[in-house]
Amino acid sequence: MNLAGKSPGEKAPGAFLLPPTMQAGLLVMIAGYADAIGFLQHRAFAGQMTGNTILLAISMAEAGWSQTGFYLAVIISFLIGVAISGSLVRLGYAQAIALSLAAVALAICAFVTARW
């Protein structure tokens, strides 16, 4: 039993209201949306770490140290998010909890007006 009161792998009632393929499709659309907004507004990808790694290497090669710090922060933030959501799911919490936290984080980011 875990902190959520469920055995690992135990599913909440109605956990799969959509087929897994549709769930995956929705997640991919959300990721694409977040990547497009992130790149257009901040020149960084929200989920595509390959792109951020390339932009990190370019900023290092050009000795753009503030940009280097920015891309390092983006990649580290992504890894922290992966660790948190992965830990929640592995502890047996419903995937909806991890996704809800991500949705709250996206909502907060939508209202933040400060620029790097």
Image (cartoon, grey):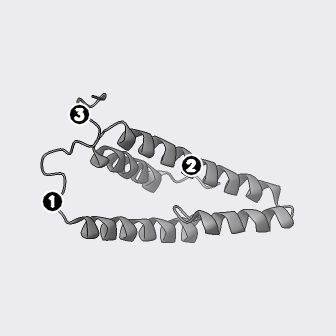
Q: Position of residue 70 (x, y in %)?
A: 69, 54
Q: Position of residue 22 (x, y in %)?
A: 25, 70
* Residue density around tag 1, few if under 14, some if 14–19, many if 20 or more, within 10 Å: few
Nearest to the observer: residue 24 or residue 74: 24
Q: Residue at 52%, 54% (x, y): give it.
A: 113
Q: Which residue is mark 2?
A: 79
* Residue density around tag 2, few if under 14, some if 14–19, many if 20 or more, within 10 Å: few
Q: Amino acid at mark 2?
A: Leu
Q: Residue at 56%, 49% (x, y): give it.
A: 79
Q: Measure how far apart labels 1 and 2 are at the Cα level.
A: 29 Å
Horizontal relation, residue 48 to residue 103: left or right:
right
Quarter location, residue 80: top right
Q: Measure how far apart labels 1 and 3 are at the Cα level.
A: 19 Å
Q: Residue at 46%, 41% (x, y): give it.
A: 84
Q: Measure how far apart labels 3 and 2 are at the Cα level.
A: 26 Å
Question: Nearer the N terminus, badge 3 or badge 2?
Answer: 3
Q: Which residue is mark 3?
A: 6
Q: Are marks 1 and 2 in contact (CB under 8 Å)?
A: no
Q: Amino acid at mark 1?
A: Leu
Q: Which residue is mark 1?
A: 17
Can residue 43 be seen in the rendering of this structure?
Answer: no
Question: In which quadrant is the C terminus drawn?
Answer: bottom right
* Residue density around tag 3, few if under 14, some if 14–19, many if 20 or more, within 10 Å: some
